[in-house]
Amino acid sequence: MFKNSIKIGPTLLSLILILLVLSLFSVNPLPTFCAIVFVPIAAKLLWKKGEVPILFVGILLQWVQICIKILYASVIFVPFENLFSNPYQIKPAFYFSLTALLVISLGINLATRKSKIISFGLLESKSNEYDKKKIMFTYLCSIILYPLLLGVAGRFGGLQQLIIKLLDLKWSIFVLFFLVTFKDASQMKQKFLLIVSAEIVLSFTGYFSAFKEFFIIGFILYLFINEKLTKKEYSFMLFAGVILFNMLVVWQFIKPDYRSYLSGGEQAQIVSVSRNDALTKAFELGNAINQDKYQDAVTALIDRISYIDIFSASISYVPISRPHTHGRLWLDAIKRVLMPRLFFPGKTAINDSEKTMMYTGLGFAGNEQGTSISMGYVAETYVDFGFPMMLLPLFLFGLLIGFMFKYIINHSYNDIWGICLVIPLFFQISTFEFALDKIVGSLITFFIIYLLINKFLAKRIDQYIRQ
């Protein structure tokens, strides 16, 4: 099970043991202990030595959405139930969610046991075969094409989801650009950092916090290229983490007024102002933050990240007020994948809020208000099967994720493209709040696009960017 898995060094192991001991004296001893002990177990299950750690980091982000309020409650010395709006079944929701994540990790581990390990050391010499200027040009082209294709994707009806997933190729080029320049002492590394910095700034002109994706993918790749972490690497990651956290806090503070400004007051996820005006407004709103507002924004950010409240409401409602659906939600999710809108134009649109209201008995804003509130795929699996039967389909789901990872690593055009093309898998597995039909559809669509890119595009792009 733990064959070839990373070794946890004495410093990290000591820190984990200290945290585990402290957790036993917290206000929430058992849930805090379980939350902390999950991390090293997941690392051993999901991260092999020398392997790019997208599986571990993807599951870790889901862990954050499950555990953040439990850890925060222990820090501020309050029972964690006090931080939730649906506290009555919050303990089962927490334990069911953490168990589900462990079972998914076991499925991934089983499926990836024979996957090839492509370390950065193997790629470093091969990266010299590529022309860095051509890679930079290709990446700049992807930056220009990305918003253009995203803007017109909706006009292609049934091809919309395929086009959106095709845009993940931008991240594959980003990975290639990162790998060939990050340990390069030439000016090309400076150009890479300049381009990425400009992208991060411009990401503030959009409706969503896209800047965080650069930090997270950068974190994954930084772990990949630095197999042995020293105090210098830990300090750098801590510094980057502090910057990201503060950016997220500021974003959470400005988000309501800023989004209203971007959309022109309409209840829709649109941008109706220029980038220059958007950046000016973001800077203006950000300057209004003070110490009290900062603390309020931190609390709001924790509320936004945490995503087991709705699960708690569904446990209170199902099966007491509404029976389990006995696999219907999973069947619907699979049927949606097998019935692409290209061939079934009459297929109904996904309405997450409607499903959430149906299985929680609570009221939520929906499509009419320009928003969507999902239960999350684990909560939907509970509605289907209850606990512990819900763990079987989630284990199979983990097997599917692991199979896709192994296939991409083992069957891509070459080792470098194996790493580049597997990175976008991270975006399909890193969000606990994903609705069931969306996460299943997203995974399958991503894999189809991978097969097409690997067969028809990877070789052509590779030949172009070689020396």
Image: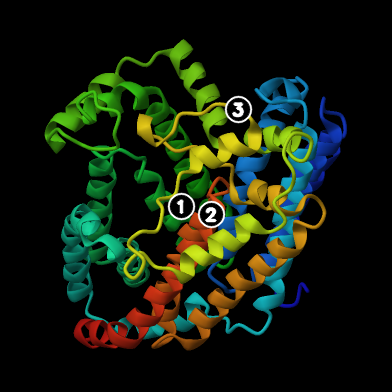
Query: Of the residues under marks 2 and 1, which one precedes in the sequence?
Result: 1
> Mark 2 — residue?
430
Rendering quarter of residue 34? top right
Q: Quadrant of the N terminus?
A: bottom right
Local crowd size for mark 3, using a 10 Å CA cut-off: few (<14), some (14–19), many (≥20): few
Residue 241 in percent (x, y) is at 49, 42
Q: Quadrant of the C terminus?
A: bottom left
Residue 28 in percent (x, y) is at 82, 29
For discs 3 and 2, the disc positioned in front in the rendered view: 3
> Mark 3 — residue?
362
340 on left or right of 381: left
291 on left or right of 263: right
What residue lies at 57% left-to-right and 73% top-to-bottom?
Answer: 51
Rendering quarter of residue 175? bottom left
Placement of 59 over or under 227, stated as above or below: above
What residue lies at 67% left-to-right and 77% top-to-bottom?
Answer: 111
Residue type, label 1: Ile
Q: Report the Cα–Cα distance between label 3 and label 2.
A: 26 Å
Q: Which mark is residue 216?
A: 1
Instruction: Give the tally of numbered discs.
Output: 3
- Which type of secondary structure does the marked residue at label 2 adopt? loop
Placement of 214 over or under 186, stated as above or below: above
Q: Report the Cα–Cα distance between label 2 and label 1.
A: 11 Å
Q: Nearer the viewer, residue 248 or 426?
A: 426
- Which type of secondary structure does the marked residue at label 1 adopt? helix
27 on left or right of 352: right
Residue 132 visible, this orientation: yes
What residue lies at 66% left-to-right and 85% top-to-bottom?
Answer: 114
What residue lies at 37% left-to-right and 74% top-to-bottom?
Answer: 449
